[in-house]
Image (cartoon, rainbow, N blue to C red):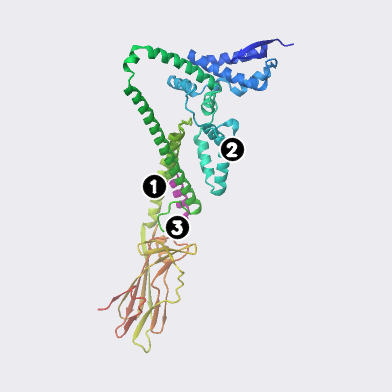
Amino acid sequence: MKKTVYINLNGYAFHIEEEAYQKLKDYLDKIERSFGNEEEAKEIVADMEARIAELFRGKHPSSDEVIALVNVEEVIKTMGEPHDIIDDDFQDDNESKISSTESAPGYRKRLYRDPENRVFGGVCSGLGAYFNIDPLVFRIIFLLSFILYGVSFLAYIIMWIVMPKAVTITQKLEMKGPADYEKWEKKLQKEYEGVSSRVKKSKVYKDFNSGWTTGSDVLGDVLRGIVKVIGIVIGLIFMIVALSGLISMVLTIIFGYTLFDFSDLGNYYSALPVYFLETSEITMGIIGLVLFIGIPLLTIFYWGFRMVFNFKTRVKYISLLGMILWGAGWILLFYTSAHVARNYANVEETYEKISLDRPSLAKTIYLKPNVNTNTPDLNEHLFDMNKLDVYASEDKIYVQGTPDILAQKGDELTLDIRKTARGRNAEDARGNAGGIEYFWIQKDSVIYIDPIFTIADGIKIRDQKARVVISIPDGYHLDIDEELKWAVTEHFE
């Protein structure tokens, strides 16, 4: 038969085995020795006793039931060992004072992830504890947002990263509130009434207790409240702007769609780079852009989160890591820009001179637009650059240019076509120039020419240009169709 004793714990009587009592006493003594401040240690041990009493009463409501060693060990496991309970704040004197103050009634609640009531990371349960709302409400909101818009997943991951997990007793008290809050409130109220009574009887209080003092106190409280509300509003704006930017960046990279489209580019952001950049350049550029833009947006979201929920993260070196990643984004963008600039380093030209057949009877050469040119319905002009126009039609992108067409006198009836382009080297530049497609056809006295040139599939945009010179011999007259006069420059002396 094991020896038992009766103990009083936070005003409640418990029947406990002697061995279990000794285990509990050693545990509380160890907690008390872990704190340097004697007053602080007594307060914390009292809090611990109150919580332990609640746990005992939950499983042993009758004082006649004997609490065994296994019950004590289970409670200790729930409460945590001393090294788990005492976090880093207690290693610093100033932080120790803050923690002591905040663990009393009137402390400011802080946002933590709740590991004891979690489904995934404890974000929803932490939000529920902070706002005193059932976590199920937040879980439903996140689930519906994910199903309807797919954006809540990113928000949940970010909050999972920035919200610390409530591990220590202090953190759990800050998250949920102390177990014996009402007792502390009554105790503080009683102490306050005693101090207030003594102060009101003093001569100093009577000399300085005026209406102006009372009014200034009220004004100070009002101003502090206004500043706090403004801070929360600014924090919410930071969070909304940063989250919108992050979502827009992800949608642009993955789907070629952005929330903020102030141009005529529509949903072609992901397709356009292929016409300018190599695959390796696109990869490096995207990574650099994500780091360069994403890190500041995450920083803004983090600061907004802190302003709204007033918490401190315990993730060490996070600022240093952010600066390193942002610097890496700078380096990747600079390297990609330099790599792209080399694609325009050399200029090369291809030249073709075609001798045309002189009409046997007519003395007039007719110049008309080429009716066989396969020109799609280019109803959406995206942008132009140096006589190159980029269009979109039926979810496909087309590039076409305007050639310089010159009609002049010459010894023979000829057609000179010069094509120029840039490239990484001479061979690459000649290949890009060869990718210019320009068509013409002669039928007796009629010459059909294209008023535009296009770029073949697979050829990158490299400042392509075309110049067409039509030479008309003496004795012949040139008749230019009305639809071509805008494109042809006549030079007859």
Q: Report crowding for label 2: few under 14, some 14 to 19, many 20 or more residues within 10 A (C-alpha).
A: few
> Residue 195 at x, y = what percent?
42, 14
> Residue 10 at x, y = what percent?
58, 15
In front of the other: label 2 or label 3? Answer: 2
Give the alpha-carbon distance from disc 1 to disc 3, as whole Å. 27 Å
Type of amino acid at the residue the image marks with label 3:
Gly
Q: In this orientation, which residue lies closer to the viewer: 66 or 360?
A: 66
Q: Report crowding for label 1: few under 14, some 14 to 19, many 20 or more residues within 10 A (C-alpha).
A: some
| Residue under pointer 3 | 266
Residue at point 60%, 19% (across, down): 52
| Residue under pointer 2 | 136
Type of amino acid at the residue the image marks with label 2:
Leu
Left or right? Give the position of 47 relative to 432: right
| Residue under pointer 1 | 334
Q: Give the position of the N terminus as an image quadrant.
A: top right
| Among numbered discs 2 and 3, the one appearing first in the sequence | 2
Vertical relation: 436 (above or below) 126: below
| In magenta stretch: residue 164 | no
